Image: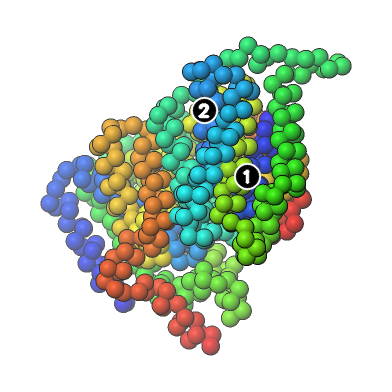
Amino acid sequence: MKGLAPIVGTMALVGTVPLITSSNVVLNFLVMVFLIALVGQGWNLLGGYGGQYSFGHAAFFGTGAYVTAVLQMHYGVNAWLSFGIGIVGGAVVGSAIGALSFRSGLKGSYFALVTLAFAEVLRIAASVAPITGAGVGTLIRLDLRPEAFQFQSRAPFYWIALGLVGASLILIRAIEHSRFGAYLVAVRENEDAAEALGVDPAAVKLGAMTISAAITAAAGCFYAQYFLFIDAGIAYGPWISIEALLAPLVGGIGTVFGPLLGALAVRTLGELGRLMAGDAPGLDLVIYGCVLILVVAVAPRGIVGVLSGLRGHALSHKAALPTPLERDNG
Amino acid sequence: MTGAVYALVALGLTLIYGVLHIINFAHGALLTAAMFAALFAYQLWGFDPYVAAIFLTPLFFLLGYGLQRFIIGPAAHGEDRNILLVTLGLAVVIENALLYAFRADTRTINLPHAFDVIEVGTTFLAVPRVIAFTVVFAVALGLWVILQRTDTGRAIRAVAKEKLGAELSGIDVAHIYAVTFGLGTACLAIAACLLIPTYYVSPHVGDAFVLIAFTVVVLGGMGSVPGALIGGLFIGVVESLSGFYLGESLGQISVFVMFILLLLFRPAGLFGAGT
């Protein structure tokens, strides 16, 4: 597949980090970067390629995290299996919300609002329902065996997170070059025109939202397994919805590598802020908010846009838009 | 009384939506900021919140004006999606700056007259509620007069209807946008001063109000002033009833669920002109 080489190359290069250093600080930091990159990649498919801005991706992250944790703790399901079911659970929630909102024709700010409201409903529900541990949260029992998806050192977690990011990169790359991807971009650029050419916008958006939710849910499952603790505020809180859209926006929306670059930049900024001002609550989010406004104001195409601007190339997704459509329908 | 304050918060939101056609995600954070301002006006200088409203309202008008004119407008490049993101970014900045400065503590003030009651026939009414109710209706009336009877009001309505046409007739659209945003923010300052005698303040207090305000706005129809008033009162009643029967957390859920159902099945609202 075209464009596979840079992904595999990046993955192989980044994969050597645990061999060079065993510093938990470095590995922890990079694992968080991968986690946010994964959450952001989910958002990127729907928001970047599909043009549907969700403000409630926490709904999928949280569902993945809770399904993983609750299945293990209350039903004794194997951790790896729970992980898989968690991803499916997120996808189910995504397609349910998507089916409801796209069928009603919600778009733009209405769509952003309804996703936000769904995430809030789930957050409140999780903070009162007994099965999620209500306000106390859910703890996954410490069980340091690979069968239980828990490891003595950080390195295996690091490779798993990296593997998930790599898989998401390949998936997005494949979608970008598929007929479905072309439909999705067509819907983003002009929904009416796409419909007139025979694309079913509701079905295309629903598909994107389901895959998007699955990717973000995978990050949630990983979070639960990595930190072994979640509560309603972590799983369904607004912070993750913000990180989800910030990473691709900073990196460059509608690009394969955008979320990963963005997650790295955003997390680095957050850490720098923490170093300079101490571990004060809220400060990292103040920085994120400023970055968000600045990016929208100054570099709306993110890091990828700036880089390709420097190299004098036009953004590939803008140029690539008309050809597949003409070929398929014209 | 919460219904009346919801109506006021929603009034600001609906005004901004009606003219700028954007959803202002920073609305809740600005309300929180106004509540902190009212709190400190009382604690540091001893201003009664009802007195503080007199100078906080113009102050927040200027703040809103400045935000739209110098941050949201230029940063958004005129694209709706960008405005969504910029107001979201503003909300995150304001809320967390407050969190950073004042921590997550919940603060309240004790006013001597906060628990006064007056007797009307056979029922007792709490004074702050009566005041809130009266003020909200006065503000709504005042806004209506501004929109209907002044030149600025006419310009605002012109921009809301036909932006390009208004610009061609010599109206400074950027200025009118900022004035509208300022008016919406000024409503929040008043709402904050009405809330503070009986409510608490914390950096996230605005969140609870803003989602309810969104519900009110959608219920009443985006951009409709009477819709915001009736919607606000209606949601206030629904919330207290469901809070009474279902407990506080589930009562909150019922408002969100109603909001989602409303968006899905009747996005134009009860009084909306259609989307």
Please state which of residues B131 and A14 is positioned toward the viewer in this rendering. B131
- Three-letter amino acid code of the residue under disc 2: Ala
Residue in the image at 45% along x and 55% along y: B75
Foreground: B3 or A163? B3
Front position among marks 2 and 1 = 2
Residue B3 in sight here: no
Coordinates of residue A145 in the picture (x, y in percent): 27, 44
Q: Chain of mark 1?
A: B
Q: From mark 2 to mark 1, how far is it between C-alphas?
A: 20 Å
Q: Which mark is residue A307?
A: none
Residue identified by numbered label 2: B37
The mark nearer the N terminus, 2 or 1, is 1
When asked about the image quadrant of residue B197, the answer is top right
Q: Secondary structure at mark 1?
A: helix
Chain letter for mark 2, please. Answer: B
Q: Residues within 10 Å of mark 2 (few under 14, many from 20)?
A: many
Q: In the rendering, at what x and y percent does residue B267 appear?
A: 69, 54
Relative depth, front residue between A11 and A226: A11
**Where A233 sits versus A196, above or below?**
above
Of residues A154 and A316, the one nearer the viewer is A316
**On the rendered image, what quadrant is the C terminus of chain B found in?**
bottom right
Q: Which of the image's four quarters has the N terminus of chain B? A: top right
Q: Going by the picture, which residue comes out furthest to the left?
A: A20
Classify B167 as above or below B139.
below
Left or right: where A162 falls relative to A109: left
- Do tag 2 and tag 1 residues touch (Cβ < 8 Å)? no
Q: What residue sits right under mark 1 in the picture?
A: B13
Amino acid type of the residue tagged 1 in the rendering: Leu
| Structure colour scheme | rainbow
